[in-house]
Structure formats: C-alpha cells, structure tokens
Amino acid sequence: MNGTQALGRALDILFVLAEAGTTLTVSEIAERVAIPESSAYRFIQTLEQHGIVERKGKGRITLGLRIFDLARSLSGQIDRQLLIMARPVMEELTRRTDETSVLFIRSGLDAICIEHVKSRKLISVSLENGRVLPLDSGASGKVLLAYESEVLIGQAVAQKSPDRAKALRQELERIRHQGYSYTNGEFDPDAFAVGAPILDKQQRIVASLSVAGPNYRFHESHLPALAEETRTAAADISRQLGWPGI
C-alpha cells in the first residue's frame, strides 16, 4: 500500500468515526472501511499516537481531542472566508428586499448567527451575531438541517414525538425540493423568515442565508419574489465557494 492509499484509509477511518456519532470497536471500523482488522489496528495505533483518535473503555475507539482542535482551526478559516464573500451579497439582498439578512452556520443541533445586515426600516428584525437558535425551528435552522446528513437529521427528529418527527421530515423534504424554507411566527411570533442553503463545491451545506422581517409587513403574495431573491443571493455565495450550480 503506497502513501496515498494509506492516507486514504486513515481518512476513511476518521470519516467512519465522525459519522457513527459514538465509539466503535476495531472490528466495526475494519468492517465499515472494508479493510482487514490487522490493518485497521495499525492505522488506529498511528492515529492514536498523534491524538487524532482515542480509546474509550475496553476496545472502544472515538475521535481524539486533536481532531477537534484541527476542526476548530479549519472552521475559523472557513468562517472568515465565508464572511468576506457573503457580506456584499447580504448588503445587496437587504437593499433589494428592505428586510434584514442573516447568515447562520450549524454547531451541533443549533444554528448560530455569524453575520447580519439590518434593514434600514424603522421597525425591523434584529438578530445579533452569536445568537443561537435550534435547528428545527425557524427558516435559517431548518435550511441547515434539511441539507445535512441523515445521521444528523435522525438525531434531531429523535427528540420529538412520532407525529412531530414525521411532520418535520416531510417539511425538510419539501425544503430540499423547493430550495428554500419559509416560516412565519415560528421562532418569534412577530417575525417571518425565508432561508436558502449555501453549498460548497461538493454540494455540502455550509451555511444558510435568510431574510427576516416583521410579519405585519408580509403577505403570502410576497413569498415567490422573496424566495427567489434569497435563493439567488445564496447561490451567488455558493458559486464563490466552488458550487457547480444546478
């Protein structure tokens, strides 16, 4: 096995552990990566020496603290790049819609606002940077959740009753189909929001871009135009991140 193949197998192990969301045995890792158990053991030993994986309990393997340090560093770099690209697009979106535009990223089962451009109108929605919202409530969070992995969606719906879980899954499917999310009075009884996904070159969800305003200013007839403006702006940022488009 050459160096490139070895690196690929090591990365496969990390992806398997990340997707599992729990500890795995060496046998389970070997089965999921489709390599001999002896090979999996050697890779895990090397990764463990560098703090990339850790042993928890008897024979259980999980991601190590070092990988989270690397992830935080990478996330910070991506966030800075994203903000540079998104800010002028958001300013234009707010100008065109006369409503506040907000940029959210996911952290666990929460959505975090990392940028906003406030509407110039006297009465407007105000969301400060750092505001945390649940993924399953509001247009910004639901867009992030809709384009996430089935593992994460499963974690989100597991906290709900069977009927609410079914309704949420149907809503997420509808969001993926139409390319945007619309909520009115869901997180804040006095506000509406329309959100769209920002995707990278692998078509993975990076962030959500939304416009939000007081619901007294909103009418159902406004939705098609607002959705189109938001989707167009989100697609603009996505293309800057390498998204190939539809």
Image: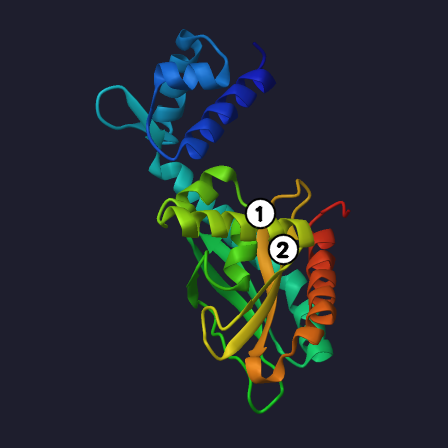
Disc 1 residue crowd, few under 14, some 14–19, many 20+, Cα 10 Å: many
Name, please, the residue furthest toward the left: 57
Residue 224 position in % (x across, y down): 73, 68
- Asked whether the residues under the numbered discs 2 and 1 touch, taking CB atoms below 8 Å apart as contact, a structural biologist would say yes
Specify the amino acid type for callout 1. Tyr
Q: In this view, does 113 lie above or below 175?
A: below
The one nearer the camera, 118 or 70, is 118
Q: Is residue 55 above or below residue 167?
A: above
Q: Residue at x 70, y 70 (%)?
A: 226
Left or right: where 244 falls relative to 214: right
Left or right: where 221 falls relative to 173: right
The quarter of the rendered structure image containing the N terminus is top right
Q: Residue at x 62, y 79 (%)?
A: 218
- Where disc 1 sits, the SS reads loop
Q: Which mark is residue 147?
A: 1
The one nearer the camera, 213 or 204, is 213
Disc 2 residue crowd, few under 14, some 14–19, many 20+, Cα 10 Å: many
Q: Which mark is residue 163?
A: none
Is residue 156 visible from the viewing direction of this image?
A: no
Q: Residue at x 66, y 43 (%)?
A: 203
Q: Residue at x 49, y 18 (%)?
A: 33
Q: In this view, does 50 lie above or below 37?
A: below
Q: Is residue 241 above or below residue 219?
A: above
The one nearer the camera, 206 or 169, is 169
Name, please, the residue furthest toward the front: 163
- Where disc 2 sits, the SS reads strand
Specify the amino acid type for callout 2. Pro
Residue 6 position in % (x across, y down): 53, 17
Instruction: Give the residue pinned by disc 2.
Output: 197
Q: How far apart are marks 2 and 1 (CA)?
A: 8 Å
Residue 199 position in % (x across, y down): 65, 49
Q: Which of the two labelled residues, at mark 2 and mark 1, occupies the earlier sequence position? A: 1
